[in-house]
Image: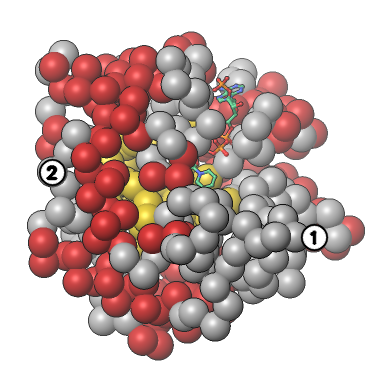
Amino acid sequence: MAAKSFKLNTGTEMPAVGLGTWQSKPGEVQDAVSYALQAGYRLVDCAYCYGNEDEVGQGLKEAFDAGVKREHVFVMTKVWATYNTRVAEGLEKSLKSLGLDYVDLFLIHWPILLNPQGNHEKFPTLPDGSRDVVHGWNHVEAWKQMEALLSTGKVKAIGVCNYSKRYLEELLLHCTVVPAINQIENHPSLPQQEVVDLCKAKGIHVVAYSPLGSTGSPLMRAEPVAKIAEKKGVSAGTVLLSYHVARGSTVLAKSVTPARIKSNLDLVELDAADMKLLDDYSADLAKKGELKRYVYPPFGVDFGFPDKS
Ligand SMILES: NC(=O)c1ccc[n+]([C@@H]2O[C@H](COP(=O)([O-])OP(=O)(O)OC[C@H]3O[C@@H](n4cnc5c(N)ncnc54)[C@H](OP(=O)(O)O)[C@@H]3O)[C@@H](O)[C@H]2O)c1
């Protein structure tokens, strides 16, 4: 299937598939980014919190030096939770590391505030070892600062990550600019249909993360995924990534392995029967109370996710 893209509520096109960079180690991520862009990727997902944006920036530069044009690449990054009261400062740090003068999309990584004056710049903790969260702080405050960034030209668009239906409804009541995207964990073991439906209704594009089940890609072994892969003569990874594009979402897959990076770009059309198999699998997990969220940092905060509330 030819590489697709989706139109955002800003009018800009966002590629259907992007390269993830979380847990991509130093010594690996520069090559991964450079290789991916030269293999045809046009979307890279980064975050200040990943601690590797310097090297991602070197990968971007290598690809630009090799002829990939900056204006053809969609770069998104995120403000970390210790910077949610000073998002412009967070943005500057990312731009400097990435070697860019703008990003295509800037996101709130998590709708909480971790103590900016705490005992660690990114992951402050209390004496009992729990995360140093500033309770009572309202995430809408960060969004107002995000909106103000648009006039600087340093961000082409703004969006959120990890917003549940409840958080998104709160934000929509108070925002002037509707988020362009909501980047959420999404796969057949966690379809998050309620927030996906709300995003669709409000013109917010869904970007799916951890499509393979994150570290070690455990979802590759899910039975219906293997069945569809066999029927179509493709890999389980291809099925898991194609599922999102069939749902109208962009998907982010992390890999530092050239053959996987390349194959993750080759998606297939899943038909109604394939999607029914995957949807039935999700419904069965939901019925048994076995939906699986792989990424859930121990913030000790109720984000309003139905599977975790
Ligand atoms: N906004 C957020 O809070 C948030 C949270 C989590 C993730 N994300 C974004 O979403 C991206 C993707 O999610 P993720 O990193 O959690 O996990 P993922 O993409 O679901 O899975 C990554 C794992 O799958 C392996 N893999 C990749 N392609 C494969 C293939 N074709 N066959 C077999 N194994 C394969 C990778 O190994 P190798 O690298 O060794 O190939 C790695 O172990 C992240 O990198 C990040 O950019 C955002």
Disc 1 under 8 Å from ligand 1? The reply is no
The quarter of the displayed image where residue 56 is located: top left
Marks 2 and 1 sit apart, C-alpha to C-alpha, by 44 Å
Q: How many labels does the image show?
A: 2
Q: Quadrant of the N terminus?
A: top left
**Left or right: 123 as drawn, with respect to 79:** right
The image shows residue 63 at horizontal and vertical percentages of: 22, 19
Q: Which residue is drawn at 17% across and 38% down?
A: 100
Residue 231 is situated, as x and y percent measured from the top left of the image, at: 67, 25
Taking the image in four quarters, ligand 1 sits in the one at top right
Quadrant housing the C terminus: bottom right
Decide: is 223 above or below 298: above
Which residue type carries mark 2? Asp
Displayed quadrant of residue 233: top right
Tag 2, which secondary structure? loop
Can residue 193 be spotted in the picture?
A: no
Display colour scheme: secondary structure
Question: At label 1, which amino acid type do we have?
Answer: Ala
Which residue is disc 1 drawn over?
Answer: 286
- Numbered badge on residue 101: 2
Give whichever of 166, 150 is nearer the camera.
Answer: 150
In the image: residue 118, left or right of residue 90: right
Q: Which of marks 2 and 1 is in front?
A: 2
From the top left corner, tell me how far across and down residue 187 is, in percent.
62, 47
Given residues 120 and 99, the one toward you in this image is 120
- Give the image location of residue 292, x and y in percent: 75, 50
